[in-house]
Amino acid sequence: MDKRFKKNVFCILAILLLLIGSAGLASADDLESLFVEGDEHTKSTVMVASYELTLETLMPGDVGLVTITLENVYSSPMSVKVKDSHGAEIDASFTVAARIREASLSGSNFKVYNKYKSSSVIGPGKQVEFPFKIKAPYEDDLYLLKLYVYAENMMGKNSPSVRHYIPVIVSSSSLKITPLAVSEESIKLEVTNEGFSKVDGVSVLASDIKGMKLQKESVYIGNMSPWESVIVVFNVSSVATEEPDKSADFRVVFNNWINEHESESLCVKIPYHITKSEDKKEVQPAATTQNYMTTPEQKDVAEAKIPGFGLVTAMFLLVVVAYLMRKQAKK
């Protein structure tokens, strides 16, 4: 029984020594500052509660944001028993606050624009966010960013550092254009998001247009999720029959958060067919449009006018011949 009693007394004395150090018992006047601020033996405990990538996947050279949330794991006051200046034992409690001395992020071939020094104090059970601006390297790979956090208690004593690894994917996979159907009336294209992130501001643009005219030179799509496909149609308003090269280049422009990108250009050609004219026996393009061909109505009208003109001419010649014959007979 005496051994157990002595053991309990020893434990209580050890706790008191951890709280007030070698200076002796705290007085009642010092309790408030001691319990709220902590002393040199009070260690803060900080951990990574969560992190968020403001780009699920970075494309080479993209600028992104990594937001780290740090938390003080001491969420409730710690209860202890101390003696006041008169030797009376009283119940008390103290809270543990953490001061962030430094927080930094690093990674192979990554550029990190900022770090934090003596930035903030995290109260018991509280969380604080630390955003880091980063720029991705130009090679596809799975990278690990390293987070280092150095904390200290309110008396300036260092606490164990925090290290955490954050995986980041860098991929050049983006939007791809595939031609589905091409004719003299329209060009149908399929746009597919082959990347791992949702993109916005997606538009398909036409350029370097030859031998034809399009009703619109751009089609707006909007947002596209990963592996989503959208079909767009460019209507052809006219084509030039004498131009064998009828083509246009198409590309996709889009935004990956604040980063502007565009896909590789795709050249789409309208098939060029030729036929032989039976009358003139010469090669002519089969492709015709309203700008370069005679409409059936106009053709029919033109063909109807030719017989009427020949009849009038023939009657005039008969009158002239009859007049000359009569004049010759009188002589």
Image (cartoon, rainbow, N blue to C red):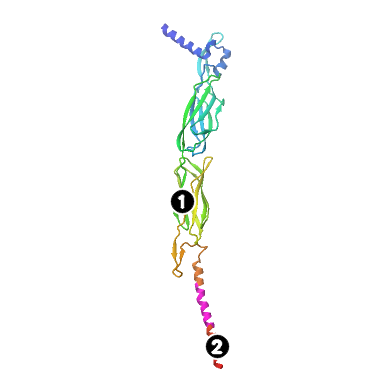
Count neighbours of disc 2 (C-alpha within 10 A) and say few if under 14, some if 14 to 19, many if 20 or more. few
Q: Disc 2 vs disc 1: Cβ atoms closer than 8 Å?
A: no
User: What residue lies at 46% left-to-right and 64% top-to-bottom?
Assistant: 284
Question: What residue sits 44% from the left and 62% below the top?
Answer: 274
Viewer-nearest residue: 92 or 134: 134
Residue 304 is a magenta residue: yes
The residue that disc 2 covers is: 324
Magenta-highlighted residues: 303-316
Q: Earlier in the sequence, mark 2 or mark 1?
A: 1
Task: Decide: is 176 above or below 95.
Answer: below
- Secondary structure at numbered mark 1: strand
Which residue occupies 53% across, 87% down? Answer: 322
- Residue at x-position 48% and y-position 26%: 163
Is residue 17 in view from this perspective? Answer: yes
The picture places residue 136, in percent across and down from the top left corner, at: 50, 36
Q: SS at mark 2?
A: helix
Q: Amino acid at mark 1?
A: Leu
Q: Of 293 and 10, which appears nearest the observer?
A: 293
Quarter containing the C terminus: bottom right
Which residue sits furthest top? Answer: 2
Amino acid type indicated by mark 2:
Leu
Q: Quadrant of the N terminus?
A: top left
Q: Which residue has dot 1 on it?
A: 189
What secondary structure is the magenta-colored segment mainly?
A: helix
